[in-house]
Image (tube, rainbow, N blue to C red):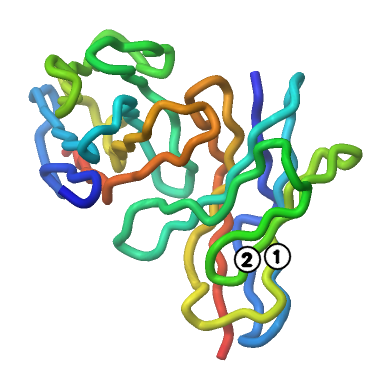
């Protein structure tokens, strides 16, 4: 597609449930990023993939959060046993993987945990 | 770790007036710095970036930013505000392949 696509755009779930958020990056982009944006805050880094492997997962808050990118394209962010504090907009971005390069962001998936 | 601080979570300017959004960085090495803009219901998009070439960087929509090492600043300016500039603006610093963002400044344009 022309841009980064994220689904679902909105997800409402109950505390304790499992959630998956999907990101389809720009074709040919080798790098993929997940960020989390809480109300009134800037995007907070979660994890970065270069190809299929997680090059840096230092931003994942705890072991309830996990992300995969099995074929080096689409990525899924998985959240187990959701908590109310997980409510945020989850942003995906992709790039050509160059340090000074531009990140292209999707519109985000808004997660609400009741 | 590198970081950025944005001064002023909300800025209001009149249409046609100068826009100045402030960003200070903290970095132990020469930084790569970015400004991103987020329009309502849209994804973040790059306005401009500094990568150690010219200290005055020009971006899209008439915005520019000047890298000042002595002040550790990378403030964003636009000579004349337009209604369409109303958005949230984020300053960011690059550390290896990931960006660290500031908390954002919401720009409101007064007609």
Of residues B45 and B83, the one nearer the viewer is B45
Chain letter behind tag 2: B
Residue name at image x 70 percent, y 47 percent? B23
Please give left or right for residue B22 compared with residue A99 in the image. right
Q: Which residue is found at the position 59% from the left and 44% from the top?
A: B34
Q: Distance between the residues labelled 2 and 1?
A: 6 Å
In the rendered image, residue B54, in percent from the top left (x then y), is placed at: 75, 47
Image quarter of residue B107: bottom right
The quarter holding residue B27 reads: top right
Give the number of the disc on residue B68: none
On-image quarter of the C terminus of chain B: bottom right
Give x and y (percent) for residue B56: 76, 54
Secondary structure category for the residue under label 2? loop
**Left or right of B46, for residue B59:** right
Q: Mark 2 points at which residue?
A: B63
Q: Which residue bears the numbered disc 1?
A: B77
Asked if the residue under mark 1 is in contact with the one under mark 2, i.e. CB atoms within 8 Å, the reply is yes
Q: Determine whether A51 is above or below B69 in the image.
A: above
């Amino acid at each position: 597609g022309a841009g980064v696509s994220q689904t679902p755009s909105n997800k409402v779930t109950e505390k304790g449930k499992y959630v998956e958020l999907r990101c389809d990056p720009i074709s040919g982009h080798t790098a993929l990023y997940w960020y989390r944006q809480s109300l009134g805050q800037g995007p907070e880094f979660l994890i970065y993939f270069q190809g299929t492997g997680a090059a840096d997962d230092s931003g994942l808050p705890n072991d309830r959060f996990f992300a995969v990118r099995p074929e080096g394209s689409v990525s899924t962010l998985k959240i187990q046993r959701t908590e109310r504090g997980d409510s945020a907009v989850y942003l995906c971005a992709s790039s050509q993987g160059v340090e000074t390069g531009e990140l292209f962001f999707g519109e985000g998936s808004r997660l609400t945990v009741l | 770790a590198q970081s950025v601080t944005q001064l002023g979570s909300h800025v209001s300017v009149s249409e046609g007036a100068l826009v100045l959004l402030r960003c200070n960085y903290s970095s132990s090495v020469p930084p790569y710095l970015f400004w991103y803009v987020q329009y309502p219901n849209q994804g973040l998009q790059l306005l401009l970036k500094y990568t150690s070439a010219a200290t005055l960087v020009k971006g899209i929509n008439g915005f520019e930013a000047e890298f000042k090492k002595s002040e550790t600043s990378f403030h964003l300016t636009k000579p004349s505000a337009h209604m369409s500039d109303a958005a949230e603006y984020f300053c960011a610093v690059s550390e290896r392949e990931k960006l660290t963002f500031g908390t954002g400044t919401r720009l409101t344009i007064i007609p």
